[in-house]
Image (spheres, rainbow, N blue to C red):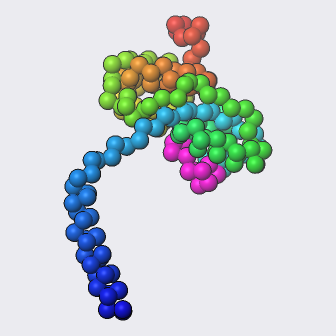
Amino acid sequence: MRAARTILMLTLFSAALVASPLQAEEATPQERPRMLLSHRVYYLQGMEPREAMTLVRTRPGVRKIVIVPGRAAMVLCDEAPRLDEAEAVLREHDAILRIAEPNAPMFLEEMGLDTSATGIFDVEPGRTLDVVTILRTMYDVRNLQKSEEGNRVTIQAAPPIVSAADALLRELGLLVPVASAGKS
């Protein structure tokens, strides 16, 4: 009886080794699941942005995080359920003053190679680095130029990214208001 079990186990093990490579070759490659990513701005109270960033980076593990110095704000980008988890963590610490979602969720990965639109952003003095960091981190913008004066940032990206970036930067108050943009 014991010998029969041993032979059966060896047969099954051998069959598994032989079948595995064949099954792997026959299987079609899995496509990466599409991720609908949302951007949310969390305005904080009673907690420094760096502390809040550490909290949401470790517990729910949010994919993209940018803090906005001087604004007590943090921008998160991930799938909605993960952002909901991050919100719950922040609420446990009574750290949320208000939340803004300046644009609709989008499939960022699918838009990554499209550079058909141009976005020109007139940036508040001294905030250019913040704007560049947000554009590169939140929207994966690689085609970006700063003006010599340092108060204008130009990007080439997909039209929905340009529009979403504009809405986010306006929400954060990092752009020169439209009425005064033309004044020198």
- Total numbered labels: 0
The relative height of residue 7 versus residue 35 in the rendered view (above or below) is: below
Query: At 57% from the left edge and 10% from the top edge, which residue is drawn?
Result: 178
Q: Would residue 9 be visible to someone looking at this image?
A: yes
Q: For the view shown, which residue lies furthest in the front direction?
A: 1
Q: For the view shown, which residue lies furthest in the bottom direction?
A: 2
Percent coordinates x, y for residue 141 in the rendering = 40, 31
56 within the magenta span: yes
Percent coordinates x, y for residue 1 in the rendering = 36, 92
Query: At 53% from the left edge and 40% from the top edge, which residue is drawn?
Result: 78
Res. 140 image quadrant:
top left
Q: Is residue 113 left or right of residue 53?
A: left
Percent coordinates x, y for residue 180 in the rendering = 58, 9
The relative height of residue 86 versus residue 1 in the rendered view (above or below) is: above
Q: Is residue 93 left or right of residue 163?
A: right
Query: At 32% from the left edge and 88% from the top edge, which residue is drawn?
Result: 4
Res. 6 image quadrant:
bottom left
Point out the stretch of residues depicted in magenta.
54-67
154 within the magenta span: no
Percent coordinates x, y for residue 123 in the rendering = 52, 22
Query: At 64% from the left edge and 45% from the top edge, which residue is drawn?
Result: 86
Tell which of 33 and 161 is nearer to you.
33
Q: Is residue 8 left or right of residue 77?
A: left
Q: Would residue 148 be visible to someone looking at this image?
A: no
Tell which of 4 and 171 is nearer to you.
4
